[in-house]
Image: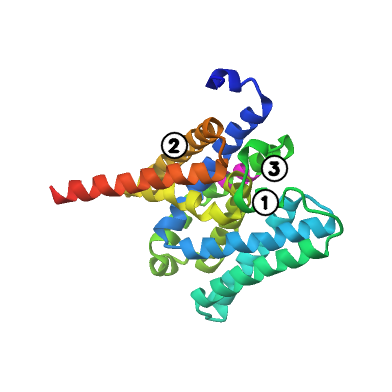
Amino acid sequence: MMTMFEVLGFEFFRNALVAGALASVACGIIGTYVVVRRMVSVSGGISHAAFGGIGLGYFLGIDPLIGAAGFTVATALGMGALQLRAKQQMDTLIGAVWAAGMAIGILFVYLTPGFAPDLFSYLFGNILLVPRGDILLMTLLVVIIVAVVAFLYRELQAVTFDPDYATVMNLPVERLSLLLLVLIALTVVMLIRVVGIILVIALLTLPAAISRLYTTRIWSMMLGAVALGIIFTVAGIWLSYLANVPSGATIILVSTLVYAGALGVERLRQGD
C-alpha cells in the first residue's frame, strides 16, 4: 500500500483533493445559511431535482453538470416564487419537486440513445474520477458564490436571521431569498461530483451544524464549516483509498461520526 505522499504523485488523487477543497468552501459558506435558516429540506428537494438536469444533459448531448446547473437554478427559482407569491406550502412543494426531478431525469436517460456510463457516479459520487474540466467548473462556481456572499454579506445575514426585521429595514427580502436559493442550487451542483445527488444534503449541512455548536457568528461559523469540510473530504478520500470502498459514502460516514461525537460532547458539557 502506497503512502499519502506517493499517492499524491497521481493526477486523479490531486484532482480529488482540489475538488474536495472547492466543495468544502462552497458547502461551508452556503451550508451555514441553510442550517441557520432551517432550509435543510428545501436543499434536499433541490438536490434530488438536479437529477432531472443530469438526464437533460445526457439527452441534449451536453455536460450533465451544466444541465444540472441550469435545471437546479430554474427549480430553485420556481420553488421560491411559488412559496413567496402563490403562498404554497413548502413541504408540499419539496415533495413535488423531489419526485418530479428524479422522474424527469429517469425519463430523459431512458430516451437518450446508447448507455449512460457514469450515471452511478452522479447518484452516489466518485471524487476520485473528477476530471480537470469539472475542476474548472467548480472553481468558477466557488468564485461566484464567494463574490456574491462577500458583496451581500450583511443583507443575507439579515434575511437569514430575521426576515421581518429585514423587511422593516426596506431590504429586498424576496429577491435575497431567491438569490439564496440559487446559491444553494449552485452548491448542490458542485457537491454532486463529490458525494453524489443522494448524499449531497449531508455534506451541505453537517459541517455547518457542527460549527454552529461552538459559535453563533455567521462568519466564524462559515470558517469552521469550511475547515471541517476539508478535513472530512480529505479523511474520506484517504480512508476510501485504503479500504477500497466508495469515496462519497466514506466522506459522509466520517462527517456523521464527527457530528454524533460533537453532539455527545455538547450534551455532556451541558450536563455539567
Q: Nearer the viewer, mark 1 or mark 3?
A: 1
Which amino acid type corresponds to the residue marked 1 in the rendered image? Phe
Residue 144 colored in magenta in the image: yes
Residue 138 colored in magenta in the image: no
Residues in magenta?
Answer: 141-146
Residue at x 15% of width, y 51% of height: 271
Which amino acid type corresponds to the residue marked 2 in the rendered image? Ala
User: Could you give the CA–CA distance between mark 1 and mark 3, rounded to whole angstroms?
Assistant: 20 Å
The residue pinned by badge 3 equals 137
At which x and y percent is residue 208?
42, 48
At which x and y percent is residue 115?
81, 54
Q: Looking at the image, is mark 2 or mark 1 earlier in the sequence?
A: 1
At which x and y percent is residue 190?
62, 47
At which x and y percent is residue 248?
56, 44
User: Could you give the CA–CA distance between mark 2 and mark 3, rounded to whole angstroms?
Assistant: 22 Å
User: Of residues 97 and 246, which is closer to you in this image?
Assistant: 246
Mark 2 element type: helix
The residue pinned by badge 1 equals 120
**Neighbours of disc 1 within 10 Å: few (<14), some (14-19), many (20+):** few
Residue at x 66% of width, y 67% of height: 101
Q: Are marks 2 and 3 in contact (CB under 8 Å)?
A: no
